Image (tube, rainbow, N blue to C red):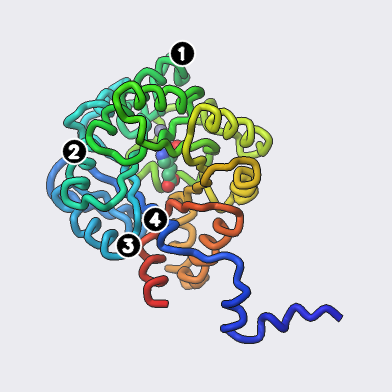
Amino acid sequence: MHRTRRLRKSDNIRRLVRENHLKVDDLIYPLFIEEGKNIETEIISMPGIKRYSLDRISVELDEVVSLKIPAVLLFGIPSKKDDEGTETWNSKGIIQQAIRFIKKNYPDLYVITDVCFCEYTSHGHCGIIENNDVNNDATLVNIGKQAISHAKAGADMIAPSGMMDGTIAVVRESLDQTGFSDIPIMAYSVKYASAYYGPFREAADSAPSFGDRRTYQMDAANRGEAIRKATFDDEEGADILMVKPALAYLDIIRDLKDNFDRPVACYNVSGEYAMIKAADEKGWINGEKVMMESLLSMKRAGANIIITYFAKEVAKLLIIK
Ligand code: PBG
Ligand code: ZN
């Protein structure tokens, strides 16, 4: 008889044979930074997460640093939007100010910036609109400008999230030509058109005012296409490949891990966070345990890095243990 239960008998033996571990080192914490003063706004569908203006964000950054979370991922909410999202490459824009502020006051914190347009365009789409759709190649030009502007402000890593073809090549070339060949790119390689982004769009004020993002984000039904898209990003020079969302796409995380010799990141998105928080508030699940189990499943699937709104909570639990 095969007796698998022998190695489950006590906590110590379970610890010895445990195959995967969640670590604080795995985590990236997203931050929403809004232009203006004295802002600290709760995001209703994401309990515990807020939008901050720069003059209020130190509480959050102090905590992130004291918990030894290695990195933050910045999203900006500008005070003015326009057709093209020109604020994204303004050297005095909210993200550029935020990067300078963080690198000056928290020099050891690793700063990653989301490069996209949806929070900055009046129509909420991830690029320039032409004939009711986002024009890929026109948008690429602006992606290059935005990436350079983040690098000049002092960003440590650039993460383009708009799903325009050719993005990684353009960002790599733009950075290399301006003296930033040492800044890595984390590619949102496999980003699905997902209903799990709902709460984020409230948080970042980035919902499209017409249509949806299905002409640029991937169809949830597709797996082969994920490999194809990641292959292009790999060839164009992405340093890290990301899958987004995470929990409903664990198979894709594993595919990327098995097929590429690159670190794989996953984005545990706003809707995944909201579901656990809501069910926990109702007393229907143990939110803390479901959180740990969910994040561990991403490690098991092959993720090296997890971007998560739970980062601070997880770090606190891991420190106690
Ligand atoms: C937009 C962007 C989105 C997220 C990060 N960057 C959502 C979207 O496509 O509307 C989602 C993050 C989350 O849901 O937590 N480029
Ligand atoms: Zn976008």
Residue 266 x, y percent position in the rendering: 50, 48
Sequence-wise, the earlier of marks 2 and 3 is 3
What residue do we see at 30% from left, 26% from top? 179
Q: Secondary structure at mark 2?
A: helix
Is the residue marked 4 within 8 Å of ligand 1, measured from its CB? yes
Give the residue type at disc 1. Asn
Sequence-wise, the earlier of marks 1 and 3 is 3
Residue ID for mark 2? 97
Q: Is residue 106 left or right of residue 284?
A: left
What residue do we see at 41% from left, 65% from top? 314
* Towards the viewer: 176 or 311: 176
* Towards the viewer: 67 or 313: 67
Residue 194 in view, yes or no: yes
Give the residue type at disc 3. Lys
Residue ID for mark 4? 309
Disc marking residue 131: 1
Q: Is residue 119 left or right of residue 9?
A: left
